[in-house]
């Protein structure tokens, strides 16, 4: 055991003296997390308006048309855009121009208020493609507001005729219109906070933080692998093999050094993400640490295998950077697997990065419990065992007497 710790301490001293280690493990993931976060709006506090933009022109100018304007402005489906509405032809051009963000247009014609008060059918002009789902949605919302207003006017007229001064038109109209705000039956749609958060932050800091952390943990294997390569080139490994130190102890010593370095990187970057980026890693600290521990085991074993396989510094670079790009891209470190198809998601989970991303995001984004990280942690541990077994086989541990 002492020989294992001696090798571990020697590797850690070499790694911590190398500026490339500090750059790959801390500076690069922080810089790229900030870069991707800004690119995908992770630092923006502006809430987007998901309502459909609709041009609006009031040619009537009556108090009833203003009431209609208020109903449409309060809609949760459409958003009135009145900036460029100067004439009906302007609105037609806006709707026809696909480069402008106006889905449809509503025109309140002259005489709308007078016709409504007279009990006649008052027609609005809607410029939209009613063959498309967007057009039918806007049409339905416009008709609902117009019918609500018309119903309130007719109710107020009837109440005034029946009750006279006890129910004047203005009073009855306001009461009838406000009654629509509290219907006897209402359907309320609720969405889990975790799902809303996942939708809103799918390409922001909650995704880029663990993604860049995992990507540059793999990139940092470059320096770890080069230590083993240098040890072989200087024949220090061969001399070590002639001593009483067993091959498995050599493997465990190098492995422990890489694991400690990567796990320390994870702890520092998780702390940075929690305190600075406000990614909720510590909602369940134990679960997050379990994923970080398992990911460090996996990546550390990968680094050990790369160091054993590489015969030169150039090979160490290739063997480190290729897994970084392939496993990170395939595993969803750059683009979330949630936005891809089922086939690509299944292929992506051949990469250990995908399992680590699932574990971190199940806690910080999706709001799941501790049980949600057990499968990702188990998969990462399985990959760690596979990589370590391959490294041991390549070094000939099984042949050692």
Image (tube, helix red, strand yellow):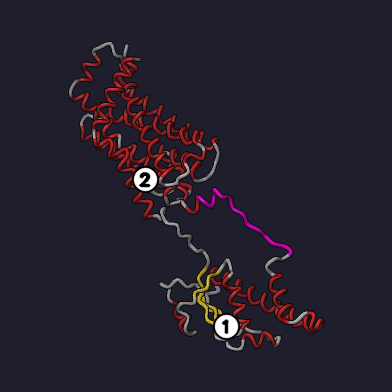
Element marked by disc 2 = helix
Q: Is residue 217 above or below residue 90?
A: above
Magenta stretch: dominant secondary structure = loop
Q: Is residue 280 magenta?
A: no
Give neighbour class at mark 2: few <14, some 14-19, many 20+ (Cα, 10 Å): many
Is label 2 or label 1 in front?
1
Q: Is residue 43 above or below residue 252?
A: below
Name the disc covering residue 267, or none. none
Pointer 1 residue: 108
User: Toward the viewer: 252 or 82?
Assistant: 82
* Residues in magenta, as a range: 184-197
- Name the residue tied to disc 2: 329
9 displayed left or right of 129: left
Above-or-below relation of 224 to 332: above
Kindly check if marks 2 and 1 are in contact, taking CB atoms under 8 A apart as contact.
no
- Residues 351 and 115: in front is 115
Residue 247 position in % (x across, y down): 30, 17
Sequence-first disc among 2 and 1: 1
Q: Depth check: 134 or 279 in front?
A: 279
What residue is drawn where x is 54% and y is 44%? 367
Which of the 4 image quarters holds residue 160? bottom right
Please give left or right for residue 111 compared with residue 276 in the image. right
Image quadrant holding the N terminus, namely top left
Give the residue drawn at x 32%, y 26%.
257
193 within the magenta span: yes
Q: What is the x, y in percent for residue 330?
A: 39, 44
Q: Is 33 located above or below residue 95 in the figure?
A: above
How much space separates mark 2 and mark 1, taking CA atoms? 53 Å
């Amino acid at each position: 055991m002492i020989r294992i710790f001696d090798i571990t301490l020697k590797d850690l001293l070499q790694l911590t003296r190398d500026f490339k280690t500090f750059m790959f493990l801390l500076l690069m993931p922080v810089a790229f997390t900030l870069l991707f976060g800004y690119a995908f709006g992770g630092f923006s506090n502006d809430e987007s308006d998901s309502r459909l933009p609709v041009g609006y022109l009031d040619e009537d100018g009556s108090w009833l048309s203003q009431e209609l304007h208020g109903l449409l402005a309060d809609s949760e489906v459409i958003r009135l855009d009145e900036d460029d509405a100067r004439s009906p032809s302007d609105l037609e051009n806006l709707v026809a121009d696909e480069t402008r963000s106006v889905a449809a247009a509503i025109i309140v014609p002259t005489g709308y208020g007078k016709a409504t008060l007279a009990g006649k059918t008052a027609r609005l002009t809607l410029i939209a493609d009613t063959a498309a789902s967007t057009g039918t949605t806007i049409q339905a919302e416009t008709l609902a507001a117009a019918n609500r207003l018309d119903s309130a006017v007719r109710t107020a007229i009837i109440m005034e005729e029946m009750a006279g001064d006890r129910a004047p038109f203005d009073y009855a109209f306001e009461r009838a219109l406000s009654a629509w705000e509290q219907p006897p039956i209402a359907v309320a749609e609720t969405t889990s906070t975790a799902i809303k958060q996942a939708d809103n932050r799918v390409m922001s800091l909650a995704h880029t933080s663990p993604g860049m952390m995992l990507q540059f943990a793999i990139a940092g294997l470059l320096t770890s692998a080069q230590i083993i390569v240098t040890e072989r080139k200087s024949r220090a490994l061969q001399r070590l093999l002639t001593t009483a130190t067993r091959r498995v102890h050599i493997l465990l010593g190098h492995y422990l050094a890489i694991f400690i370095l990567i796990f320390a990187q994870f702890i520092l970057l998780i702390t940075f993400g929690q305190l600075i980026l406000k990614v909720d890693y510590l909602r369940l600290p134990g679960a997050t640490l379990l994923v970080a521990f398992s990911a460090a085991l996996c990546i550390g074993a990968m680094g050990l295998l790369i160091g054993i396989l590489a015969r030169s510094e150039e090979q160490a670079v290739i063997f480190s950077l290729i897994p970084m790009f392939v496993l990170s891209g395939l595993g969803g470190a750059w683009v979330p697997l949630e936005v891809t198809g089922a086939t690509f998601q299944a292929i992506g989970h051949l990469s250990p990065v995908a399992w680590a991303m699932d574990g971190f995001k199940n806690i910080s984004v999706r709001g799941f419990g501790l049980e949600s990280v057990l499968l990702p942690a188990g998969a990462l541990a399985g990959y760690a065992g596979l990589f370590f077994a391959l490294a041991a086989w390549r070094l000939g541990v099984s042949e050692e007497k």
